[in-house]
Image (spheres, rainbow, N blue to C red):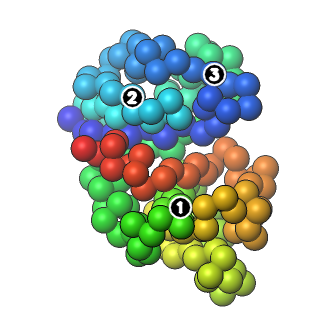
Amino acid sequence: MTRYIALLRGVNVGGITIRSADLRELFEGLGFDGVRTVLASGNVAFTAEGADAAALKSRIERALSDRFGYDAWIVLITHDDLRAAIDGFPFDAEDAHRQPYVVFTSEPAVLDELLDDPGRFDPDVDPIAGGHGVVYWNPVKGTTVDTPFAKLLGRAKFKPTTTNRNLRTLHKLVD
């Protein structure tokens, strides 16, 4: 059995509303064990037996689209990889003036594109760093839609392949 975390993109924002109970029911209906939702922002922890991650991702996205009627995109990560992403956070996660974010992507090429020439971002405004399969980002609170990196991340071409989470949310997912 492998422990997975499904990070849904764009849930409970922009008119796509999915109740946690309905999300849990869907995952249980797909035959997964130990299904647990965390917060109302599309975070599901579960276990699956002998599944190919790419096939599993496609199966979940298709089920979400069919049940809730939207173009569903998820990033699927193992519990161990999520723990490693949390442990690798390179900034001061306790800085009350900043948002400790981890950006996940389902496509390695997107990760490379986001990290291409990180020197183009002011480290005081947009501190970013690469990690194993993630980008760490630590913007000042209240600026998370205005900075140059935020604008890059918000481009439509990244919508189907990226999602970000606050480090505090990630801790709740692995605990």
Q: Residue at 37% of width from left, 61% of height from top?
A: 85
Q: Secondary structure at mark 3?
A: loop
Badge 3 local density, few (<14 within 10 Å), some, or many (20+)?
some
Badge 1 local density, few (<14 within 10 Å), some, or many (20+)?
many
- Which label was assigned to residue 17? 3
Quick one: which residue is furthest to the bottom in this view? 119
Residue 117 seen in this snapshot: no
Label 3, label 2: how many angstroms apart (C-alpha)? 14 Å
Label 1, label 3: how many angstroms apart (C-alpha)? 25 Å
Q: Is residue 94 left or right of residue 163?
A: left
Q: Quadrant of residue 45?
A: top left
Q: Secondary structure at mark 2?
A: strand
| Disc 3 and disc 2 in contact, CB within 8 angstroms | no
Instruction: Tell me the residue that label 2 is attached to.
Output: 37
Label 2, label 1: how many angstroms apart (C-alpha)? 22 Å
Q: Which amino acid lies under the numbered mark 1 shown in the image of this protein?
A: Gln
Instruction: Tell me the residue that label 1 is attached to.
Output: 99
Residue in the foreground of this view, choosing between 116 and 1? 116
Residue in the foreground of this view, choosing between 169 and 152? 169
Q: Residue at 40% of width from left, 19% of height from top?
A: 24
Image: 126 above or below 72: below
